[in-house]
Image (tube, helix red, strand yellow):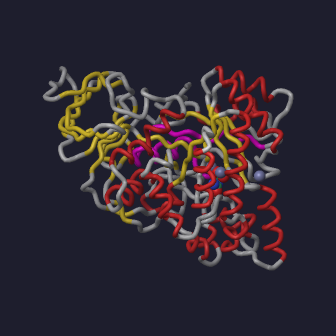
Amino acid sequence: MALLIKNGRIITADADYTADLLVEGETISQIGEGLTAPEGARVIDASGKYVFPGFIDPHVHVYLPFMGTFAKDTHTTASQAALIGGTTTYIEMLAPAQSEPLREGWEKWTGLSEGKSACDYTFHLGVTRWDDKTETTLRELVGQGMKSFKVFLAYKGAFGIDDDVLYRVLTLARELGVVVTAHCENAELVAQLQRKLLAEGKTGPEWHEPSRPEGVEAEGTAHFAAFVEMTGAEGYVVHLSNERALEAALEAKRRGVNLHIESVIPHFLLDKTYAERPGVEGAKYVMSPPLREKHNQHALWTALEQGLIDTVGTDHCPFDVSQKAMGEGDFTRIPNGIPAIEDRVNLLYTYGVSRGSLSLSRFVESASTKAAKLFGLFPRKGTISVGSDADLVIYDPGYRGHISAATSHMNNDYSGFEGWEIDGRPDVVTVRGEVAVEGGQFVGDPGRGQLLRR
Ligand code: URP
Ligand code: ZN
Ligand code: ZN
Ligand code: ZN
């Protein structure tokens, strides 16, 4: 069925205008003034609303075995929550255990997601070990359109790699023209500091941040940048959380290192005092890199406004309260992560655009367009243009509400943003031309999502 969206204020990374949009089939077929609806088309009046390109979350964990347990979402719950929040494409971290060859991980992750996601998705291929098949598998999967890798400099013994593997991954990525995304914390430093703090009887969640202080991330960032520089590869720092790490990344960029920066919504809004709440209340806010001292938020917002931070993701990683409680008496056993896939767009809009000084164009660019460009999805995704996929968000800036676990669609029993006000929300969301969300409810096809080959 065709869809005519009338009188919306269309916002892309480089334009802001009022027009009608005609969607036929899965794509946008016309943009203009006074378009007429073809026979049988549904007409939506978007007067007073924004029409944004579907938002892209470049950093999501759905299936994730981690710290002896599993993240709680399925592709069904995560994708519907994503859509309700305006995210129409997510990039999941495919992160095999170190005991698992990449090929097995690929089969597991694609098997779990196939036919289960309501929106489109793709993967960053996590390289967590290097065996005699890794290179062949990576070449094959890149040939099949999986054009980004993921490495962890943290979590040794789980996902983390050493410098020898880092060099191999970057060298291969350079040859294949693939971006390497990296979690940049120095694993040895973290391990030493964890041991020291536990030996001193410092076991609560408030010690998570001191076990991986800003300098640990700054070192990891500079370290990764040095390897990107030496190999001539293209790098992408994930979830950069603080001013010192930002300075390290920007210093590398000034030298000409081909490096991009992602920060995630928790670090813009939550500070380390949340993780200092006693017991499991603090554990809810344990993620890595940790929530930081508040002054860092100002640095992140400023860098985002200036375009120095490229993308805003979530690092969506839901563990419930009982899982968070596994770390009672030992903060190193608290499963790391905060759920946010449903809330990223509304939070960035509210605290960036509505109540802050982030422009609408930077909002769209950082939460959609730039990820599409960096990860090979543009202009199919990430913009509003004739021929692009009709992944559209009709956004109501007049909506007023609150975030709460009680009304969330993520498979979780707490929200890190409980009670936070939001100044807008998606009214209608489409996935390749089909309405998937109306008035805050999922009304779409639960299996419509496709694995995007890039
Ligand atoms: O705490 C986090 N971020 N959990 C998910 C794994 C990761 O490091 O991205
Ligand atoms: Zn990470
Ligand atoms: Zn180093
Ligand atoms: Zn992550």
Q: Is residue 453 above or below residue 47?
A: above
Q: Residue at x 42, y 52 (%)?
A: 305
Q: Is residue 4 magenta?
A: no
Between residue 210 and residue 277, name the one nearer to us.
210
242 relative position to 127: left or right? left
Which residue is the extreme one toward the front?
Answer: 255
Q: Residue at x 38, y 33 (%)?
A: 383
22 relative position to 288: left or right? left
Q: Is residue 292 visible?
A: yes
Count of numbered labels shown in the rendering: 0
Q: Residue at x 72, y 72 (%)?
A: 328
Q: Is residue 351 above or below residue 364?
A: below
* Percent coordinates x, y for residue 20 in the rendering: 20, 32
Q: The C terminus appears in which quarter of the rendering? A: top right
In terms of image quadrants, where is residue 151? Answer: top right
* Percent coordinates x, y for residue 54 in the rendering: 39, 38
Q: Residue at x 59, y 44 (%)?
A: 253
Between residue 292 and residue 282, name the one nearer to us.
292
* Percent coordinates x, y for residue 416 in the rendering: 52, 64
* Percent coordinates x, y for residue 78 in the rendering: 52, 46
352 relative position to 259: left or right? left
The region drawn magenta spans: 69-97
Q: The N terminus appears in which quarter of the rendering? A: top left
Q: Is residue 70 visible?
A: no
